[in-house]
Image: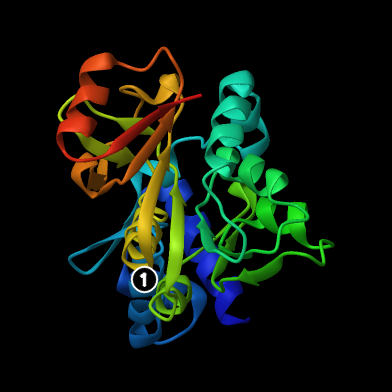
Amino acid sequence: MTSSMRRAQIVSSLRTKGAASVRELAATLQVSESTIRRDLDLLDRNGELVRTYGGAALSPRAAAPEISFAASAEHDSAEKEAVAERAAALVEDDMVVVLDIGTSTRLIARRLRGRPVTVITANLAVLDELRDDEAVRLCLLGGVVRRNYLSLVGSLTETALRQVSADLLFLSCTGVRPNGHVVDDMEVETPIKQAMLESADTVALVASEAKFPGTGSLRVCSLAQIDTLVTTAGADPQTLELCRRAGGKVLIA
């Protein structure tokens, strides 16, 4: 059994039982306890489970059904198209642009076709949009494939981002709270977003009105770290004013 198959078995076991000890998993999979500990540490970093004393439990997010990329793309599609159109206008020729995971950034990529720019991403939907475009220099970050949401995550992705120096990041999120916190609901993706923030000179948050306040309990950053917020007319005006007071520019698509 390969290491990836073994880790899949661990997650499957936790889906059935909810929790398991290192000793129990080692006996079931017929490997050493030290091997299981390494597997659990990796799965914990990737957000697929939560390490506990002597074992692991299924991550609450992993236990809940996750909306797929395709289903997410259908939500507020007109607003996302408008945001993408306004956001893409911020890109100048020869820029190095980082595109975050998400459906809105896929739409931005579509509008960068034929442009002499460099696009860096962990978004497999962006790859699909730009893979055959000879004008765009496309750089795909490494990592673990999350097939349901067409993204790459994990320590390999974070390590690669530490080598990136970009002009502009288009950041996505699942919510913008009234207190100015930009939040997300994916444990496995939040560290990638935070690494992206460190990689770019300028940050543009793309968030349609449905993201105010949206959902999510994991803090990605604050509006004070955002240079430009691209949204739609129905976004909460008090939160937009908070962004302006923090020094950010607000663009209404």
Q: Residue at x 16, y 38 (%)?
A: 246
Question: Residue 203 or 63: which is nearer the viewer?
Answer: 203
Where is residue 4 shown, x and y percent of the image? 58, 74
Where is residue 13 shown, x and y percent of the image? 48, 57
Q: Looking at the image, can residue 67 be seen?
A: no
Q: Residue at x 59, y 22 (%)?
A: 75
Question: Residue 143 or 58: which is nearer the viewer?
Answer: 143
Quadrant position of the N terminus in the picture? bottom right
Pick out the residue farthest to the top. Answer: 234
**Element at label 1:** helix
Q: Residue at x 47, y 71 (%)?
A: 157
| Left or right: 48 in relation to 91 | left
How many numbered tags mark residues here? 1
Colour mode of the rendering:
rainbow
Where is residue 193 shown, x and y percent of the image? 38, 56
Q: Looking at the image, can residue 102 be seen?
A: yes
Q: Residue at x 59, y 31 (%)?
A: 72
Residue 195 lies in what quarter of the image? bottom left
What's the amino acid at mark 1? Leu
Q: Please, is residue 81 above or below residue 21 in the view?
A: above
Callout 1: few (<14), some (14-19), or many (20+) C-alpha neighbours within 10 Å?
A: many
Where is residue 8 shown, x and y percent of the image? 55, 64
Question: Residue 197 or 69: which is nearer the viewer?
Answer: 197
Give the residue at mark 1.
Answer: 40
| Left or right: 214 in relation to 79 | left
